[in-house]
Amino acid sequence: MTKFRGLGTALITPFTENGALDEAALERFVDFQIDGGVDFLVPCGTTGENPALTADEHRRVVEIVVRSANGRVAVLAGAGSNATPRAIELAEQAIDIGADGVLTITPYYNKPSPDGLRRHFGLQAEAIEKKKSGFPMIMYNVPGRTGVNMTAETTLRMAAEIPNIIGVKEASANLEQIMTVIRDRADGFLVLSGDDAWTLPLIAAGADGLVSVASNEIPRLMSDLVTAALRGDFAAARAVHYRVLPLLTGNFIESNPGPVKFVCKLLGIIDTDTLRSPLAPITDASRKKLEAILKECGLA
């Protein structure tokens, strides 16, 4: 699935000062991302504060992103839940709206076994296939958020058994595990970095791209990094990587997306850095650190 190779942005969800969904800001933000060279857009993931969105807002965000993208880039809609029926519902909804694929996370809090993961993803993929044959689904492994790690063995087994599972976004920070998937995957199965700071080494090891937090702030630079790495120009990729590395790590000095929303506001990309409860505004100390990081990276 070449439409999901390269750079995807895990989109923030802009809110107004009073916490309402800012639809006009989201439309502008989609244009900003596409103008910045991203290859696909990923609404309603963790960076988009999907746990704090109502069901209607989740649908609306995907609708706005699909409509605003208007076929210029692909849309990989977030369709994850720790309840299998809800994950199925979100995937079917994404198909109805016109998304090009879905990204679905390992169930959080429940801590399913490998068999539980296979059942969850298998049932979701089966429902997707019935709804629209061949519609692509990418799994998302981020144990730091979910409390469960999807092993290489489990990933590879599902990839082999379920045709419409076409890739995995890997944010386990377990290089051996990720490289095992890269080594043993079938042709065409995508491995995407889910961690900005790991992108360069993972593409060097054979990964296919990145679903990025930092590209919310610096889409052109992250596009340059990923594009250079994928074409094998690692000198150019390293130059960008080391320039922006302090920001790639600084985005996580507090819970995502607090820092990235603050930086986007500071850079004039969005008007407010409003977060939905239970997330709180980042501290003044973190704000000062991020301001210093932007100067260090030559971005402010």
Image: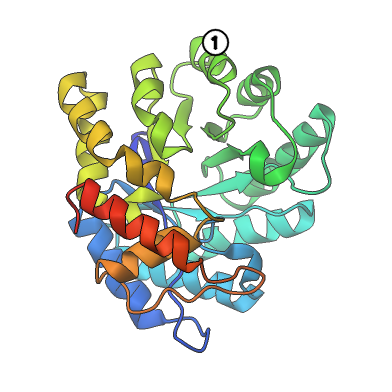
Name the residue beneath numbered marker 1. Answer: 184
Left or right, 238 with reference to 106: left
In the image, is residue 237 above or below residue 260? above
Image x and y of residue 56, in percent = 61, 78
Quarter that holds the N terminus: top left
Q: Hey, which quadrant is residue 158 in on the image?
A: top right
Residue 90 higher or lower than 191, as above or below:
below
> Horizontal and vertical percent for residue 16?
44, 84
Mark 1 secondary-structure assignment = helix
Mark count: 1
Label 1: how many residues lie within 10 Å, few (<14), some (14-19) or many (20+)? few
Q: Residue at x 84, y 46 (%)?
A: 110
Compared with 160, 246 (above or below) is below
Q: Is residue 30 left or right of residue 228?
A: right
Q: Residue furthest bottom?
A: 18
For the residue pair 233 and 288, the one nearer the viewer reads as 288
Q: Which amino acid lies under the numbered mark 1 shown in the image of this protein? A: Asp
Residue 94 in view: yes
Q: Is residue 283 above or below residue 139?
A: below
